[in-house]
């Protein structure tokens, strides 16, 4: 996230499927092995790469990824997490 680069997510474990769904929901990447998961199919992966790098939506993904990255570039992720937890505990 902190680099502002669209992602191709290849989930293989139960808890990582959420990341694939999340990048698509946020418009910052694609789930690269939706059909073959938990494996990877060459055709499906190739299509995912093309969508992220040169597809109709790729420019928008770059813009969204960079905008999401801004707060994380200013502070390391652990600092952002600490501040958020502190904020929640103070409520």
Image (spheres, rainbow, N blue to C red):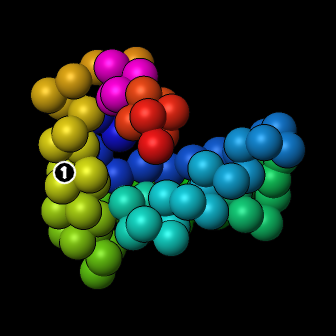
Front position in the image: 91 or 53: 91
Quadrant for the N terminus, please: top left
Query: Would you call the spot at circle 1 few (<14 residues within 10 Å), some (14-19), or many (20 or more)?
Result: some
Relative to 6, is 89 on the left or the right? right
Q: Which residue occupies 17% across, 62% down?
A: 63
Identify residue for label 1: 66
Q: Which residue occupies 55% across, 60% down?
A: 22
Q: Is residue 42 visible?
A: no
Q: Position of residue 43 (x, y in %)?
A: 63, 62
Number of numbered discs: 1
Relative to 53, is 89 on the left or the right? right
Q: Quadrant of residue 72?
A: top left
Q: Position of residue 15 (x, y in %)?
A: 78, 42
Q: Position of residue 82 (x, y in %)?
A: 41, 22
Front position in the image: 38 or 23: 23
Magenta highlight: main SS = helix
Relative to 30, is 1 on the left or the right? left
> Element under label 1?
helix
Residue lying farthest bottom? 56
Residue segment shown in magenta: 79-84
Q: Is residue 9 visible?
A: yes
Magenta stretch holds residue 83: yes
Q: Which residue occupies 50% across, 50% down?
A: 8
Residue lying farthest front? 91
Q: Position of residue 20 (x, y in %)?
A: 61, 55
Front position in the image: 68 or 45: 68
Residue 13 sits above or below residue 54 on the image: above
Q: Quadrant of residue 77?
A: top left
Magenta stretch holds residue 12: no
Relative to 71, is 43 on the left or the right? right
Q: Which residue occupies 46% across, 43% down?
A: 91
């Amino acid at each position: 996230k902190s680099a502002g680069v669209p992602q191709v997510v290849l989930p293989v474990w139960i808890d990582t499927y959420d990341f694939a769904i999340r990048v698509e929901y946020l418009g910052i990447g694609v789930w690269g092995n939706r059909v073959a998961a938990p494996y990877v199919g060459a055709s499906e992966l190739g299509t995912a790469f093309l969508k992220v790098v040169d597809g109709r939506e790729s420019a928008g993904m770059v813009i969204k990824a960079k905008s999401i990255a801004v707060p994380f570039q200013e502070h390391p992720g652990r600092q952002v997490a600490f501040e958020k937890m502190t904020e929640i505990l103070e409520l």
